[in-house]
Image (cartoon, rainbow, N blue to C red):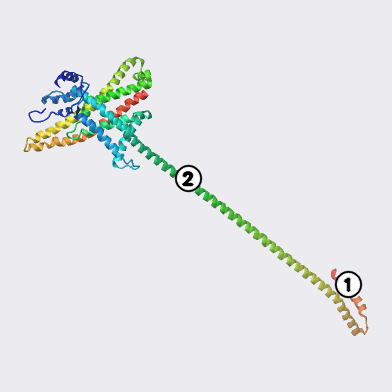
């Protein structure tokens, strides 16, 4: 995977490396670096949230305050976007947010792995949300659900045209939801790798040229800060869009 | 994973143009393509995503969210309870104060009533005492006047006698005539009556 200068391809970081070879029904289900970081995201968040709430103080300490803040943040998101009918789905939305937040954040640690940069992972989650909210909508509203594709108050002539647009936009939801997260992670981590690689390459030139490596290095620090923001923001965006889709399913506009 | 190359090609074909810039990096790599598009890795990723997200969901749904929710609910209830307690205490205090003030007002009224009654009684007593003293004085005046009148009549009666005797003495000395006292008395009283009549006129 390395070229003549010894520099890795910026996308080599996304390679899946099996850690434990496993197979199930003819499929390769090896435990990989991606799986390891999924496990870490779930493990670290669970341990953090459970140990932070161990004492369950009336006046929360620092850790408990953080755990409660995450809870309140998601609860408020569900409350304001879905309403009281969203309560049964709160644990799922909460898990989704925590899984993505910890996945994105852990992925920023050097030498770690970002499973949210895998299109199959983000697409599977988006597809699950899409299928889930569609089933909820059909279960709740029956055939009346299809009125969702007919915009209210539109001129009669435009209705067939608008139905086509509404149907397309509905089915594009899982694609846009998954690609948004995947592309953000892919682009961010690629960019970090490019700047890091550049810094290493320039410093390798030796002498005065080494000073030139400061430029990509400083840029790398700024970009890392930006990526922390993106990591949190994309977890939030994925979660809030899920809330909105759920709201559409429960209330049909 | 070379047997998946044709799958990979179809996957690339359906991928959005956003990947175009990323795929440009592949030029220097010995194995072309984004690792994400190697569908041989997909079953494993899907499998572990389902398993681990499922486990995560169970942990969050059964352990984490009920626990945090319970703490927040308990805190909310404690705060509401404390506020309710404070409100009750405040209203109790207001009630006690109102009671105290009404009691004070009652006591003030009682005292005023009592003072009024006492004043009235004192006035009555004083008036009674005054009347008694006035009656006594009136009695005394009356008896004194009676005594005075008696003394006056007595004196007047004695005056007749004295006048008669003086007349007898005067007659005897002047004319040498001896008169009896009864005669003199008769004359004197007639004169006195005449004088009294003149005095009255």
- Left or right? Give the position of B25 relative to B179: left
Picture coordinates of residue B200, whole percent (x, y): 85, 69
Residue B157 circle label: none
Q: Secondary structure at mark 2?
A: helix
Residue A167 appears in the figure: yes
| Residue at the spot of label 2 | B91
Picture coordinates of residue A80, whole percent (x, y): 35, 31
| Residue at the spot of label 1 | B193
Chain at numbered mark 2: B
* Contact check, label 2 and label 1, Cβ < 8 Å: no
Answer few, some or many: residues within 10 Å of disc 1's Cα (few below 14, many 20 plus, some between 14 and 19).
few
The residue mark sitting in front, 2 or 1, is 2
Residue A248 position (above or below residue B112): above
Answer few, some or many: residues within 10 Å of disc 2's Cα (few below 14, many 20 plus, some between 14 and 19).
few
User: Which residue is at 29% across, 39% downward?
Assistant: A52
Q: Nearer the viewer, residue A71 or B26?
A: A71
Quarter of the figure with residue A92: top left
Quarter of the figure with residue A222: top left
Residue reaching furthest left?
A207
**What separation in Å lies between label 2 and label 1 (alpha carbons)?**
102 Å
User: Which residue is at 38% across, 30% downward?
Assistant: A84
Picture coordinates of residue B148, whole percent (x, y): 79, 72
Picture coordinates of residue A103, whole percent (x, y): 23, 32
Chain at numbered mark 1: B
Q: Secondary structure at mark 1?
A: helix
Quarter of the figure with residue A43: top left
Q: Nearer the viewer, residue A76 or A95?
A: A95
- Left or right? Give the position of A22 relative to A129: left
Total numbered labels: 2
Residue A82 appears in the figure: no
Quadrant where the N terminus of chain A is found in the figure: top left
């Amino acid at each position: 995977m390395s070229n003549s200068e010894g520099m890795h391809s910026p996308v080599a970081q996304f390679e899946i490396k099996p850690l434990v070879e496993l197979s199930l029904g003819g499929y390769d289900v090896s435990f990989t670096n991606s799986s390891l970081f999924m496990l870490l995201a779930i493990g670290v968040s669970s341990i953090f949230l459970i140990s932070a709430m161990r004492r369950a103080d009336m006046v929360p300490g620092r850790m408990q305050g953080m755990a409660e803040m995450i809870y309140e943040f998601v609860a408020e998101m569900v409350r304001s976007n879905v309403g009281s009918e969203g309560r049964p789905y709160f644990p799922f939305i909460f898990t989704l947010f925590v899984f993505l937040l910890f996945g994105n954040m852990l992925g920023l640690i050097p030498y770690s792995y970002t499973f949210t940069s895998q299109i199959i992972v983000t697409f599977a989650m988006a597809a699950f949300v899409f299928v889930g909210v569609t089933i909820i909508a059909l279960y709740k509203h029956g055939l009346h659900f299809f009125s969702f594709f007919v915009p209210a108050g539109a001129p009669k002539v435009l209705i067939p045209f608008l139905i086509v647009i509404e149907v397309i936009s509905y089915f594009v939801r899982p694609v846009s939801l998954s690609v948004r997260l995947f592309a953000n992670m892919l682009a961010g981590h690629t960019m970090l790798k490019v700047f890091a690689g550049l810094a290493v390459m320039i410093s390798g030139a030796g002498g005065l040229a080494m000073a030139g490596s400061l430029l990509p290095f400083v840029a790398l620090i700024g970009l890392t800060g930006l990526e922390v923001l993106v990591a949190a923001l994309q977890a939030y965006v994925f979660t809030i869009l899920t809330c909105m889709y759920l709201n559409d399913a429960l209330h049909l506009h | 994973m070379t047997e998946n190359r044709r799958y990979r090609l179809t996957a690339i074909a359906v991928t959005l143009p956003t990947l175009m810039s990323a795929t440009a990096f592949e030029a220097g790599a010995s194995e072309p393509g984004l690792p994400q598009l190697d569908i041989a890795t997909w079953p494993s990723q899907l499998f572990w995503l389902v398993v681990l997200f499922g486990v995560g969901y169970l942990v969050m749904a059964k352990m984490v969210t009920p626990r945090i929710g319970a703490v927040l609910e308990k805190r909310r209830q404690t705060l509401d309870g404390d506020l309710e307690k404070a409100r009750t205490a405040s209203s109790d205090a207001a009630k006690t104060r109102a009671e105290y003030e009404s009691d004070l007002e009652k006591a003030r009224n009682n005292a005023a009533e009592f003072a009024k009654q006492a004043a009235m009684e004192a006035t009555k007593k004083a008036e009674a005492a005054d009347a008694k003293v006035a009656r006594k004085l009136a009695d005394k005046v009356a008896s004194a006047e009676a005594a005075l009148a008696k003394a006056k009549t007595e004196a007047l009666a004695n005056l007749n006698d004295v006048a008669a005797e003086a007349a007898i003495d005067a007659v005897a000395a002047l004319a040498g005539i001896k008169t009896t006292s009864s005669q003199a008395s008769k004359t004197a009283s007639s004169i006195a009556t005449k004088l009294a009549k003149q005095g009255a006129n």
